[in-house]
């Protein structure tokens, strides 16, 4: 990505899904543990079933991790891949952008008993949020999603800039697209 401020330039991010790769390794390790229990003959069939379940979950997580996470903003709109196939929105469907983080884990961590026992939950990652126009919200059926945040689509993508900078750049592209459409 370049740092030029032109709205006609393509803004593109592609990252590798490291957390899902690590999850797949954990599932494979658990499957190997249960397979070893079965091979040693400690119990009958339960470890073999657990080994197959964890192996299948590990394989699914590994396949899921091979698809890169991506975000692309160009003159026509926004396109992203977070899970599964690519999804896209035109600039006319987008009302605005924002950054949101679920504060419920912070409220839980602030409880005196949690602080006394020191069992802290990790902070939830910030998300790039997209608010759709009412027509797009109705057409895509996203009513009622993320109601506490006021947004319709949440993207958890690891990008190499702060999410506030990214939302500022996306808002500038949205304003430029609206200006092109108006005149």
Image: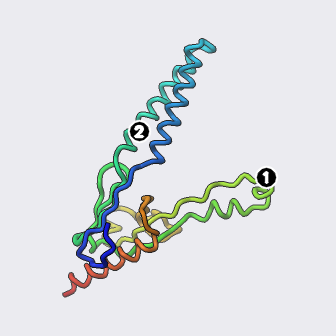
In three-dimensional space, the C-alpha distance between marks 2 and 1, rounded to whole angstroms, equals 35 Å
Q: Quadrant of residue 7?
A: bottom left
| Number of marks present in the image shown | 2
The extreme left residue here reads 183
Q: Position of residue 166 (x, y in %)?
A: 40, 71
How crowded pointer 2 is (Cα within 10 Å; few <14, some 14-19, many 20+) is rated as many
SS at circle 1: helix
Q: Is residue 56 above or below residue 74?
A: above
Q: Quadrant of residue 132?
A: bottom left
The residue carrying mark 1 is: 117
SS at circle 2: helix
Q: Residue at x 46, y 29 (%)?
A: 55
Q: Residue at x 52, y 22 (%)?
A: 49
The residue carrying mark 2 is: 62
Q: Is residue 44 above or below residue 50?
A: above
Q: Is residue 115 left or right of residue 180?
A: right
Q: Position of residue 8 (x, y in %)?
A: 23, 75
Q: Nearer the viewer, residue 31 or 53?
A: 31
Q: Is residue 159 left or right of residue 44?
A: left
The extreme top residue here reads 41
């Amino acid at each position: 990505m370049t740092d030029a401020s032109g709205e006609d330039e393509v803004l593109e991010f592609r990252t590798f899904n490291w957390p899902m790769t690590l999850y797949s390794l954990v599932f494979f390790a658990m499957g190997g543990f249960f397979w070893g229990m079965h091979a040693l003959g400690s119990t009958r069939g339960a470890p073999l079933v657990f080994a197959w379940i964890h192996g299948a979950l590990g394989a699914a997580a590994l396949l899921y991790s091979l698809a890169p996470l991506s975000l692309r903003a160009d003159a026509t709109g926004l396109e992203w891949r977070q899970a599964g196939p690519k999804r896209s929105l035109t600039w006319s469907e987008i009302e605005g952008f924002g950054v949101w983080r679920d504060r419920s884990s912070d409220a839980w961590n602030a409880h005196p008993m949690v602080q006394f026992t020191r069992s802290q939950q990790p902070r939830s990652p910030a998300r790039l949020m997209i608010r759709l126009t009412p027509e797009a919200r109705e057409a895509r059926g996203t009513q009622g999603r993320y109601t506490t945040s006021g947004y319709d689509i949440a993207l958890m993508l690891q990008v190499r800039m702060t999410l506030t900078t990214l939302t500022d750049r996306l808002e500038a592209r949205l304003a430029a697209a609206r200006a092109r459409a108006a005149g």
